[in-house]
Image (cartoon, grey):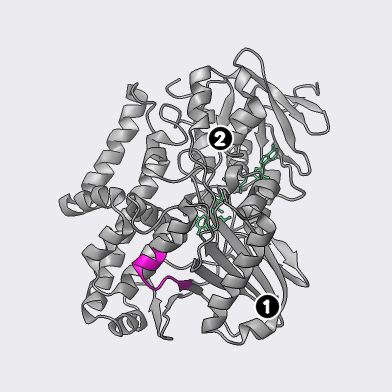
């Protein structure tokens, strides 16, 4: 085994792995990050299609401002474009423009096409959602207790979180707690009367989740996505999402960290429930007494550690983590004359449309009328497609891929007729590709569904929300742990802080 030259090894150079690595390197630790792919960034890594570079998975990527500041990412080139519009495309050709910028007169005018009452409520709704998102942000930075054992060390941050909730005021406190368990149908119906406004908002609640607008808990996922997006629209990174990874890698290296790409970890080495290092795909072994994994919990614990090394009841719990990918992404390289405007363009006309799109996923089918979100970057048009479930019934992935492409292009071209003739090349990424190329179990982009029984002190598992595992020295720092999923860096930041403090509550 290679001599112990490193204090800490990190498996996976997704943004969370890099955030954790940079915090630890800045704290003076000798850190090595090992990434299986030929580039860093995980789901944020930029790719090329023809002569164009594009973001293959995610249309925007905002890290939490405190992380950007603490790691000096602006100095390393990270910058965001101005917020783009969020537009819900209606079947009759009408367009609902929704901005969450206070006082945006064009938004109120656009909502008035459908309901004057909804336009009047919009500013109050946005202000409430911003406060709810701020509460969620506080929750994501609070170490969660290892229930049922709440010691003083964990009780104090929880008390502070309860105070943050209390400070929202009696009415908001009640509304936030209640909304978390509600469906987006119930939640939006309490705010708005027009179907178009309700569905446009509800769509953001199910974006990336294998849930429908009627699923309990989509009130929570709406707040979660609102927090991560900074509202409704995707906010593009200047130069593409790969620049987030570039800035993180630069900050990490400036702090003395080392990164190896094309270095897949085949095994996390464990001796009597104590981590001792890793073995790479090429057989090389690297020793360390602390290992953080940014891969998803199931892949980490069952795939890289292995069930025989873990307590049987813990193995059973890990097997029960719900991983359910149901998203595909269709990318079209065009000649540039696609006709789509800039912004986040949603096909989400009614609440029932969203629910039916999800129904298909429940039965292992492709949605005939999927919920779509289209964005553009130069000549590339990217279409997010839901639902296209990982566990397909009665159809293979090659046939499914062709159907997904045909359906997505036909629906968007129904609104922008120039699109079809402009297409030069198509690349589609399915849930099966997400598993094979990005190492995501069942193609679950969030490393585990964000649902009520897998959030806060239950993420990834009840009793293990403090990033620790039953293996001494092995921690989880990816989206499957508390603070994730999605793009924010919160899980990586929290894990680094837990490691630096020592294993809390263990
Ligand atoms: C189509 C799509 C749309 C999305 N939309 C949104 C959205 O609107 N809002 C939002 O917040 N989020 C969205 N997400 C989710 C978001 O992109 C992810 O949750 C986030 O990027 C995960 O980041 P991560 O750093 O935790 O993990 P990842 O980016 O998954 O990184 C994990 C890394 O670990 C590496 N790895 C795995 N196994 C090994 C191994 N054995 N050895 C070495 N390396 C390994 C992988 O190669 C990868 O680089 C979307 C995702 C997709 C796919």
Q: Quadrant of the C terminus?
A: top left
| 53 and 92: which is toward the camera | 92
Instruction: Examine the image and state in which quarter residue 113 appears.
Output: bottom left
Query: Mark 2 Cα within 10 Å, few/some/many (few <14, many 20+)?
Result: many
Residue at (39, 53) in percent of width and height: 221
Q: Nearer the viewer, residue 249 or 99?
A: 99
Kindly identify which residue carries mark 2. Answer: 297
Does residue 16 appear in this view?
no
Residue indicated by mark 1: 379
Could you tell me if residue 307 is visible in this image? Answer: yes
The residues colored magenta run: 346-354
SS for dot 1: loop
- Residue at 28 percent across and 34 percent down: it is 159
Q: Position of residue 367 (x, y in %)?
A: 50, 63
Please report the residue visible at 54 percent of the width from the left and 71 percent of the height from the top: 374
Q: Quadrant of the N terminus?
A: top right
Q: Outermost residue toward the front?
A: 394
Q: Is residue 241 magenta?
A: no
- State the CA–CA distance, disc 2 to disc 1: 37 Å
**In the depicted view, which residue is nearer to us: 246 or 405?**
405
């Amino acid at each position: 085994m290679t001599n112990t030259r490193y204090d800490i090894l990190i498996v996976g150079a997704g943004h969370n792995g890099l955030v954790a690595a940079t915090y630890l390197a800045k704290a003076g630790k000798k850190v090595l990050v090992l990434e299986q792919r030929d580039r860093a960034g995980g789901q944020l890594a930029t790719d090329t299609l023809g002569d164009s570079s594009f973001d293959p998975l995610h249309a925007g990527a905002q890290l939490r401002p405190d992380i950007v500041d603490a790691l000096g990412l602006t100095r390393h080139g990270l910058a965001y474009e101005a917020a783009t519009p969020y537009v819900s495309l209606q079947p009759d050709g009408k367009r609902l423009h929704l901005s969450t910028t206070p006082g945006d007169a064009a938004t109120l005018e656009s909502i008035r096409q459908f309901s004057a009452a909804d336009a009047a409520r919009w500013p109050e709704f946005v202000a409430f959602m911003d406060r709810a998102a701020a509460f969620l942000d506080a929750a994501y930075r609070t170490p969660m207790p290892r229930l049922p054992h709440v010691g003083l060390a964990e009780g104090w941050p929880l008390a502070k979180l309860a105070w943050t909730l209390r400070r929202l005021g009696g009415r908001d406190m009640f509304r936030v707690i209640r909304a978390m368990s509600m469906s987006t149908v119930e939640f939006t119906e309490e705010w708005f009367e027009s179907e178009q406004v309700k569905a446009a908002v509800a769509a953001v609640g199910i974006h990336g989740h294998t849930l429908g607008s009627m699923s309990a808990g989509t009130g929570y996922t709406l707040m979660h996505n609102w927090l991560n997006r900074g509202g409704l629209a995707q906010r593009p990174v200047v130069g593409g999402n790969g620049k987030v990874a570039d800035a993180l890698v630069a900050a990490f290296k400036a702090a003395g960290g080392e990164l190896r790409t094309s270095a897949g970890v085949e095994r996390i080495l464990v001796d009597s429930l104590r981590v001792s290092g890793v073995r790479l795909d090429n057989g090389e072994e690297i020793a360390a007494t602390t290992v953080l994994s940014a891969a998803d919990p199931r892949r980490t614990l069952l795939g890289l550690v292995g069930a025989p090394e873990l307590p049987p009841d813990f193995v059973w719990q890990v097997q029960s983590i719900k991983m359910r990918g149901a998203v595909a992404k269709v990318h079209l390289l065009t000649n540039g004359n696609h006709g789509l405007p800039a912004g986040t363009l949603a096909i989400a006309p009614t609440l029932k449309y969203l629910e039916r799109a999800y129904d298909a996923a429940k039965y292992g089918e492709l949605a005939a009328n999927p919920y779509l979100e289209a964005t553009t970057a130069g000549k590339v048009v990217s279409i997010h497609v839901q639902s296209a479930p990982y566990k397909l019934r009665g159809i293979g992935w090659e046939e499914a891929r062709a159907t997904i492409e045909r359906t997505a292009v036909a629906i968007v071209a129904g609104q922008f007729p120039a699109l079809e003739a402009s297409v030069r090349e198509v690349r589609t990424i399915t849930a099966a590709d997400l598993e094979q190329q990005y190492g995501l179990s069942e193609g679950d982009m969030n490393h585990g569904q964000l649902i009520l029984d897998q959030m806060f002190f239950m993420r990834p598992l009840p009793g293990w929300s403090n990033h620790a595992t039953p293996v001494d020295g092995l921690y989880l720092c990816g989206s499957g742990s508390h603070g994730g999923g999605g793009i924010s860096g919160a899980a990586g930041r929290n894990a680094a802080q837990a490691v630096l403090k020592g294993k809390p509550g263990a």
